[in-house]
Structure formats: structure tokens, C-alpha cells
Amino acid sequence: MPNVMNRVAPREPPDLLVDLATDALRLLTPVFVIVAVFTIVTIVVARRTVKGSNVQGGYALMVAFGVLGCVAGLITGNSREPIAGPLLTGLLGVITALLSYLFSQEALRTYRPYIPFLIIALVVNAVAGLSIGAAYRKRFEIAAEDRHLQLLLFEKVQLELWKEEEKLKLYQEYPAAAERKRAAEKN
């Protein structure tokens, strides 16, 4: 009996390294673009707002908070599991602890004017990452549904047609078997 799957076009084995690089590029490019755009805007606003404080570390912290917010938002938005509550609670706990530490240490008082901008960078990038993650999840769900429909089509239509074609071939090769089948169906 011929293999039914031979009718499906053969696929080349995947090149895992190329697939990994392509997927990482597709996933990380929007993250870097979002972080760059929103963090640069936040830095520009901070430079114009915070007078007399030219701390380079404040800008690096804004970039770090932007990346953290965007990645957390992307993971939360892309997840099919209800992790938003625990993830956001943990993220807010870490941010609160870090900002409290920055605010309480006298040696780090030069960073105090940047705290609102750190929060802004985190929140804006988290919301942007959340929307991108939700768009990815939607795309994956649509692709999974399409694959499910293709499998149903194969199982319910194409496979049944193939079985009927094979029966016809057998009846043409063995006319006596076809006669016995017709006689059985009459009785």
C-alpha cells in the first residue's frame, strides 16, 4: 500500500542555526526599535527638564529600564498563559526596590531627578512591548488554526478521496472482487 504522505511535498530538513537567527532577528528588531525610539524621546525630555545634572549613568539607566520594560511586555503579551499578574507584580517589586535604593542612598542623589523618567521609560516600553507581543501571539494563533484546518481537510477530504481512488484501482485490477462487493451491497 503506498504511503499517503508521499502526496505531500517533501520538506527539506530545517537549518536550525539559520532558523534561530531569523527568529531572533524577527523578535528582537521591534524591541530594539521601540526601545531606541521611546528611550531617546525620554532622554531628550530628561535633558531638557533636569537642569544642572549631567549624569551619563542616568541615561544608561533609562536605556536599561526601557529594555527591561519592553522585554517584560513582549513576554507577557506573547504568552498564552496567565502570567501577567505574577510577572507584573514581580517586576513592580524589583523596580520599587531599586528606585527606593536609589532614592535612599546619599551617594546616588545625582540620580534622583531621573527617577520619574526611569519609570516613564519602563512603562512606555512595557506597553509597546505588550502590544507587539499580543500581535505575535495573534499571528501564532492564526497560523495554528490554519494548520489545524489543513489537517482536517487532509483527514476528512483528501484521505477519503485517496481511499476511494485506491478502491477503484483495486476493482479495476480484480473485477471478481468488484462483483462480490456489488452482490454484497444488493443483499
Image (cartoon, grey):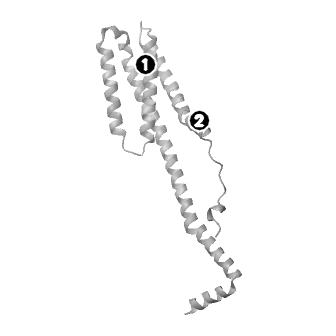
131 or 170, which lies in front? 170
Locate residue 138, reporting x and y percent: 49, 46
> Which image quarter holds the N terminus?
bottom right
Residue sitting at x 46%, y 11%: 56
**Which amino acid is tagged 1?**
Leu
Above or below, 162 relative to 103:
below
Above or below, 33 relative to 179:
above
Q: Residue furthest right?
A: 173
- Mark 2, residues whose alpha carbon is within 10 Å: few (<14), some, or many (≥20)? few
Q: Is residue 97 shown to the viewer in this render?
A: yes
Number of marks: 2
User: Which mark is on residue 21?
Assistant: 2
Is label 1 in a helix, a strand or a loop?
helix
Residue sitting at x 42%, y 24%: 65
- Measure the alpha-carbon separation of dots 2 and 1: 28 Å
Mark 1 = which residue? 61
**Which amino acid is tagged 2?**
Ala
Is label 2 in a helix, a strand or a loop?
helix
Using residue 65 as the reference point, say whether residue 24 is left or right of it: right
Quadrant of residue 173 within the rendered picture: bottom right
Residue sitting at x 31%, y 23%: 97
Locate residue 175, reporting x and y percent: 69, 86
Q: Earlier in the sequence, mark 2 or mark 1?
A: 2
> Which image quarter holds the C terminus?
bottom right
Above or below, 88 relative to 142:
above
Q: Residue furthest front?
A: 1
User: Which mark is on residue 171?
Assistant: none
Using residue 185 as the reference point, say whether residue 62 is left or right of it: left
